[in-house]
Image (spheres, rainbow, N blue to C red):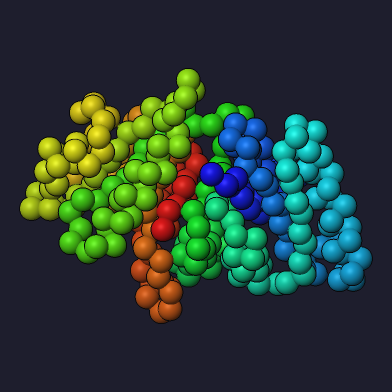
Amino acid sequence: MSERQLFVVFDPTTDEQLALSRAQVIASNDGSKVHLYACIHEDTAPSDNEEEGVATQQDILQRAVAPLKAKGIEVSTEVTWQKDWYSAVVEAAKRCNADEVLKSSQRHSKGQRLLKKTSDWALIRECHCPVLLVKSTATQEPRKVLAALDISGDKESYGELNQNILTFCQRYTGGDNGAEVHFLNGHKDLPSRPDRGTLLRVCGVDSEYVHIRMGDPDDVIVDTAKELGVNLVVLGNSARNGLSALVKSNTAEKVLDKLECDLLALT
């Protein structure tokens, strides 16, 4: 089995690099390789000159990855100069064949939420691989996970998305330090309530780890995550571009700012 490639987005506006710290934890546990990427421009670069700015930022990245190299983690770095940085992140992640993108997540203003003009939402919609948005400073893999499924959907894509979520959750359940994984299926009304027996068979876990809740999906997910005290929420994401993406967000985008824990969006 080939090593996973973790693509970590470096935030040049802060000294606290939550995504890089989480990548170090993951790579130390499973041997993943880490690619640290920074996209800078006039507003964020250490110099107004492109050549000098890129060189200086490379030095900053090399210092940032020194602790990972000291632990024997295979690390590479990359800096590009581009203003539209979330698009640059998507393209760079494709170039390095990333298996997962890690990015520190910040709360967004009301205006940003209305216009959907945030890098986090753009990554969730457009990235070709799973995106882990890191909010916590935890120094270990998540101990309790909530995975949101939807077995009521009649589209084939829903079944594929559910399977991707189930497969990815297996990563957290193995070994002596396996996490406690809960599964949630929200439904808006009684007619759309999923069959519990079917959900149990799909999840393959004991009944106490399967939850069915009625309400808006985003509220149900956030409330259940808080109730269970989870460290990570895993969601499926149906990528959507164009005008509809500007006026209607999917569940992953809606819960992003409401959650207090990390969010993993799968496609």
Question: At x 60% / y 31%, what residue is drawn?
Answer: 29
Q: Is residue 110 visible?
A: no
State the quadrant of the C terminus: bottom left
**Where's residue 141, x and y in %?**
54, 31
- In the rendered image, the residue lying farthest to the front is 1
Q: Is residue 157 visible?
A: yes
Question: At x 38% / y 44%, what residue is drawn?
Answer: 167
Q: Nearer the viewer, residue 45 or 198?
A: 198
Q: Quadrant of residue 119?
A: bottom right
Q: Nearer the viewer, residue 258 or 154?
A: 154
Residue 150 located left or right of residue 107: left
- In the rendered image, the residue lying farthest to the left is 191
Above or below 178: residue 261: below
Residue 162 located left or right of residue 82: left
- The total number of labels drawn is 0
**Where's residue 251, x and y in %?**
35, 56
Residue 43 located left or right of residue 194: right
Q: Nearer the viewer, residue 120 or 65?
A: 65
- In the rendered image, the residue lying farthest to the top is 176
Above or below 121: residue 33: above
State the quadrant of the N terminus: top right
Question: At x 36% / y 47%, what residue is drawn?
Answer: 165
Question: At x 18% / y 61%, what residue is drawn?
Answer: 154
Q: Nearer the viewer, residue 10 or 136?
A: 10
- In the rendered image, the residue lying farthest to the bottom is 243
**Where's residue 245, x and y in %?**
41, 72
**Where's residue 193, x and y in %?**
13, 48
Q: Quadrant of residue 134?
A: top right
Residue 87 located left or right of residue 178: right
Above or below 138: residue 215: below
